[in-house]
Amino acid sequence: MKVLIVGGGGREHAIAWKAAQSKKVDKLYCAPGNAGIAEAAECVDIGVMDFDKLIAFAKEKEIDLTVVAPDDPLAAGAVDAFEAAGLRVFGPRKNAAIIEGSKAFSKDLMKKYNIPTAAYETFDSPKAALSYVETADMPIVLKADGLALGKGVLICQTREEAKEGVKTLMLDKQFGSAGDRIVVEEFLTGREVSVLSFVDGRTVKVMTSAQDHKRAGDGDKGLNTGGMGTFSPSPFYTKEIDEFCQKNIFQPTVDAMRAEGREFKGIIFFGLMLTPKGPKVLEYNARFGDPETQVVLPRMKNDIIDLFEACIDQTLDQVELEFEDNAAVCVVLASEGYPEHYEKGYVISGLEKFKENPGYYVFHAGSKWNEKGQMVTNGGRVLGVTAVGKDLKEARANAYKAADWVEFGNKYMRHDIGKAIDEV
């Protein structure tokens, strides 16, 4: 079959790499893709939001399955557009992708259906939000309601920070219209865990757990980013916690969406906080996480195309998800200055070593070929260096060894990805 993947980052590279292993796939395309994805798929220069061109391409090439991976096209209705054109597509429709597209919607959904989450208030008015934070307990969390590339969350330790945060989101519009409405919620403490899941509208099958590192600097210091690294599985996500989440969070969320007339087919990413009072939902995403995908898919035994089709056809209950009994760690190599100002165009070297060493992977997030035929940096997050090992400590050592194979001009990385595993 012919498969088209929509997207062009590290997550899409991991999906393309996994899809290329499927015995069902004869030809793989990716739009727009990147220099790394080009090794697994034929890249097509069409933007993720250009639905008309994507659909025309899918019809011209007689694509059997399109996988819409990023959040923006999902929230804007890419799946609806493909379905209206009579094309087979994987991902949630617009009315279901709102679970990520609006923080206020997802919080209201959890409140209505008694799904554990942090206490919160929603504000459309900067004045009302500022008045609220004047008396609220600190620290506090401010969230832009709309999509903000995973960066629209501010953790404010003091009242002054909270007031400045409201100004940043609602008045300065740092994240554009995403900050027209904000959610202000209580600050939860505990271990963060990410759990990706396949959903067919009724059945939910969770993948192995992972943990992301959002802050730019070591020791969780600095600005929020799209993710600086991740590990899988989380040693803190125990069998008991999984059983609680299956009963009180995962299935209730899928049932709630169906009850609301928003049947969800695709990937739900559950961002959890393991608090002293039990697991609570921090956020939902309506797609594979980035960089969580880069550690989850290398451990998955299943053919990913089988899973995409089971979600579309509502036969997920017949599938047994299987993962290797090992661990994986991903270290993101970024451009110095990310997530704010950084330079691009530096030549990348050392990538050939990944082809020579099984169990080591490099997923491209921001790379391209320049006019001289050299691989160069083309983004804030450049590469996701992933390695597996028999356990997390071995995987972590392998990932940092592999990170040192790669060189480019303004290379930057955190040096403490997965350090929490030392406390177990």
Image: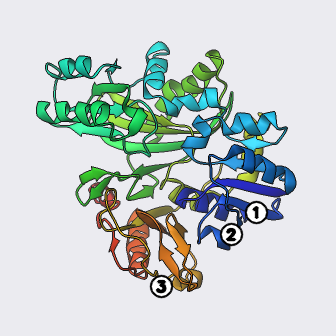
Q: Label 2: which residue? A: 40
Left or right of 193? Residue 322 is right
* Residue 28, label in figure: 1
The correct choice, above or below, for 133 with respect to 27 in the image is: above
Q: How many residues crowd around disc 3 within 10 Å: few (fewer than 14), some, or many (20 or more)? A: few
Q: How many residues crowd around disc 1 within 10 Å: few (fewer than 14), some, or many (20 or more)? A: many
Residue located at (66% from left, 17% from top): 261
The correct choice, above or below, for 423 with respect to 240 in the image is: below
Q: Give the residue type at disc 3.
A: Gly
Residue located at (30% from left, 26% from top): 185
Residue located at (67% from left, 25% from top): 263
Q: Which label's residue is closer to the chain start, 1 or 3?
A: 1
Q: Which element is circle 1 on? A: strand
* Residue 244, label in figure: none
Left or right of 236? Residue 142 is left
Image quarter where the N terminus lies is bottom right
Circles 1, 2 touching at the beta carbon (< 8 Å) = yes
Q: Give the residue type at disc 2.
A: Ala
As measured in the structure, the alpha-carbon distance from the residue carrying label 1 to the one carrying label 3 is: 26 Å
As measured in the structure, the alpha-carbon distance from the residue carrying label 1 to the one carrying label 2 is: 7 Å
- Point out residue 276 in the picture as x, y percentages from the top left corner: 28, 32
- Point out residue 273 in the picture as x, y percentages from the top left corner: 36, 37
The correct choice, above or below, for 187 with respect to 373 in the image is: above
Image quarter where the C terminus lies is bottom left
Circles 1, 3 touching at the beta carbon (< 8 Å) = no
As measured in the structure, the alpha-carbon distance from the residue carrying label 2 to the one carrying label 3 is: 19 Å
Q: Which element is circle 3 on? A: loop
Q: Label 3: which residue? A: 350
Circles 2, 3 touching at the beta carbon (< 8 Å) = no
Left or right of 134? Residue 126 is right
Q: Give the residue type at disc 1.
A: Leu
